[in-house]
Amino acid sequence: MKRTMTRPLLVVSWICRLVAAIILLQTLFFKFTAAPESVYIFTKLGTFINAHIPFASINTLEVSGRLGSGIMELIAAVLLVTPRFVSAGALLAMVATGGAIASHVTFLGIEVQGDKGLLFFLAIAVFVTSAIALVLQRMQIPVIGNRL
């Protein structure tokens, strides 16, 4: 049995998906151009990982983490605005920003280089809007979607 979404819920879904996708896409410029703020964040991540895995190169971790997360966020943004793959995009966006939130709470701090917590709160916004989109599009989730 296929359930259809009411028009108001469809509008809420699209708003959440667009907000999340726009935030994810606007951060790509900084990650792909090696902006100083992005390099700083991922160097701290590399230093944190290197403290636990000494053979991991901080520079390699910075570059691969920055570019890898950028690619993951690009894919999530595209999936979020593709109606057939909303649940996959929302889940991927939640994983990406969940990692960012965890990094802010553990070793980065809420405020990074005087941004007054902007990056942290943008990550929270993407996580929440993606979670709402996932709940609204839960029928797309393979295996368990029909039971939710």
Image (cartoon, rainbow, N blue to C red):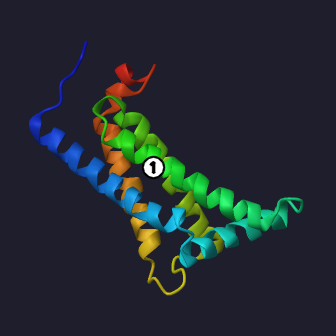
The answer to which image quadrant residue 142 occupies is: top left
Q: Seen in the image, is 79 located left or right of residue 98?
A: left
Which of the pair 68/116 is nearer the observer?
68
Residue positioned most to the bottom: 114
Instruction: Identify the element where label 1 is drawn.
Output: helix
Q: Position of residue 90 (x, y in %)?
A: 40, 43
Is residue 122 shown above or below 144? below
* Residue drawn at 83 percent across, 59 percent down: 56
Bin the neighbour count of mark 1 within 10 Å (Cα to Cα): few under 14, some 14-19, many 20 and up. many
The residue tagged 1 is 74
Q: What residue is shown at x 19% (from left), y 47% (from top)?
A: 12
Q: Position of residue 105 (x, y in %)?
A: 58, 69
- Looking at this view, name the residue that lies furthest to the right: 55
Position of residue 61 measured from the top left corner of the image (x, y, whole percent)? 73, 61
Which corner quadrant holds the N terminus?
Answer: top left
Q: Residue at horizontal 38%, vertical 35%?
A: 87
> Which quarter of the figure is the C terminus placed in?
top left
As drawn, which residue projects farthest toward the front? 33
Query: In this rendering, is residue 9 above or below 32?
Result: above
Amino acid on which disc 1 is placed? Leu
Identity of the residue drawn at 53% across and 50% down: 71
Name above or below for residue 71 compared with residue 46. above
**Would you say 111 lies left or right of 129 here?**
right
Q: Quadrant of residue 25?
A: bottom left
